Amino acid sequence: MRVLVTGAAGSLGRTVCPGLVAAGHEVVGLDLVPAPDGTTFAWHEADCADADAVEAVLAAEHLDAVVHLAGFPDEASLPTELTSHVVTTAALLDAMLAHRVPRMVYASSNHAVGRTPRADGELTEHALPRPDTYYGVAKVAAEALLQLFVDRHGIDAVACRIGSFLEQPGTVRALSTWLSPGDAVRMVLAALTAPSPGYAVLHGISANTRGWWDLEPGRRLGYEPQDDAEAYAAEVVARAEDEDEARFVGGPFALERFHRPALGG
Ligand SMILES: NC(=O)c1ccc[n+]([C@@H]2O[C@H](COP(=O)([O-])OP(=O)(O)OC[C@H]3O[C@@H](n4cnc5c(N)ncnc54)[C@H](O)[C@@H]3O)[C@@H](O)[C@H]2O)c1
């Protein structure tokens, strides 16, 4: 497949792009910043929130799918979050329709359901939207946009609710929520190639012994995680905040220190 990867210079992008190439896919990278040294595939320096720029990229490339990883992965004001996650997704979806690109794999987040209490038990893909931050609100809205385009236009879209993408887990929470680099590639490959998923949600985590997010939705799409954060448990140092971070799906983002005005800086 010929795949546009947005946010290709980012933390996930720098793992996913070579993984797709190794699996035999043709990658086209897109980011706000220039291609990292040594990049061997096509690259567009563009802002995904700029609909004209996105349209020009999709007109120039003949794509089979878009893996949308571009976005600010942290808390900011509501307008900033909506631009970063919803407007970018909208610009890509509009251009995908215009150029008949049939699938998007989207880097959504656990923070779309981050205020779901741990005490509710296993987290399923049917959890109601329950964001913990404006970041989470924007991920909810981006997922809703995907669902709308699937229902209206018959494209396929897989929203990957990613946990903690890291080389290795560094906190007690991450022993449950870790997504390893190898599993990140496996997740994107499955979401790209699953036959006719329509709109689907999966949990982007590894096969962590301490995980409590249902892995079945991913397995139904062919995502079989191979790594387990438990292998690093002995290296993780307990902290005073671990107990608070364990109360909600979103961990630290669900805590009071993230409270701020919606339209503030
Ligand atoms: N890293 C995680 O643990 C995690 C967890 C849940 C969800 N996610 C989501 O995965 C995606 C990637 O996260 P990451 O950790 O790689 O973040 P990152 O900040 O390392 O990389 C994001 C990349 O996107 C680019 N970018 C940002 N806005 C852009 C725009 N408007 N147009 C073009 N490029 C833009 C940045 O320049 C950067 O290279 C984000 O959408 C994030 O919300 C990440």
Image (spheres, rainbow, N blue to C red):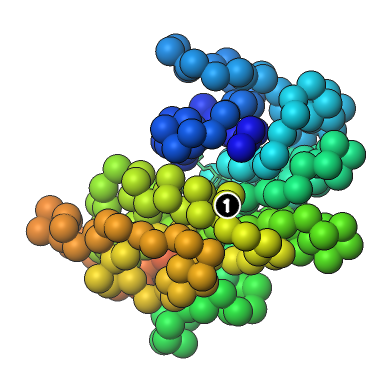
Q: Quadrant of residue 56?
A: top right
Q: Nearer the viewer, residue 257 or 246?
A: 246
Which residue is at a point 68% across and 49% down the rendered structure image? 104
Q: Quadrant of residue 93?
A: top right
Q: Residue furthest left?
A: 234
Which residue is at a point 48% across and 78% down the rendered structure image? 123
Q: Quadrant of the N terminus?
A: top right
User: Residue 110: x and y, percent?
Assistant: 52, 63
- Please, is residue 131 above or below residue 204 in the view? below
User: Residue 19: x and y, percent?
Assistant: 43, 36
Picture quarter with ligand 1: top right
- Please, is residue 1 above or below residue 177 in the view? above
- Left or right side of 11 for 261: right
- Please, is residue 17 above or below residue 264 in the view? above
Q: Quadrant of the C terminus?
A: top right
User: Is there any visible trace of residue 66 in the rendered image?
Assistant: yes
Q: Quadrant of residue 246?
A: bottom left
Which residue is at a point 37% across and 51% down the rendered structure image? 183
Q: Residues within 10 Å of mark 1 (few under 14, many from 20)?
A: some
- Please, is residue 224 above or below residue 24 in the view? below
User: Residue 25: x and y, percent?
Assistant: 54, 34
User: Is there any visible trace of residue 260 in the rendered image?
Assistant: no
User: Residue 160: x and y, percent?
Assistant: 55, 58
Dot 1 corresponds to which residue?
Answer: 193
- Left or right side of 233 for 136: right
How many marks on residues? 1
Which residue is at a point 43% across and 82% down the rendered structure image? 122
SS at badge 1 = helix
Q: Amino acid at mark 1?
A: Thr
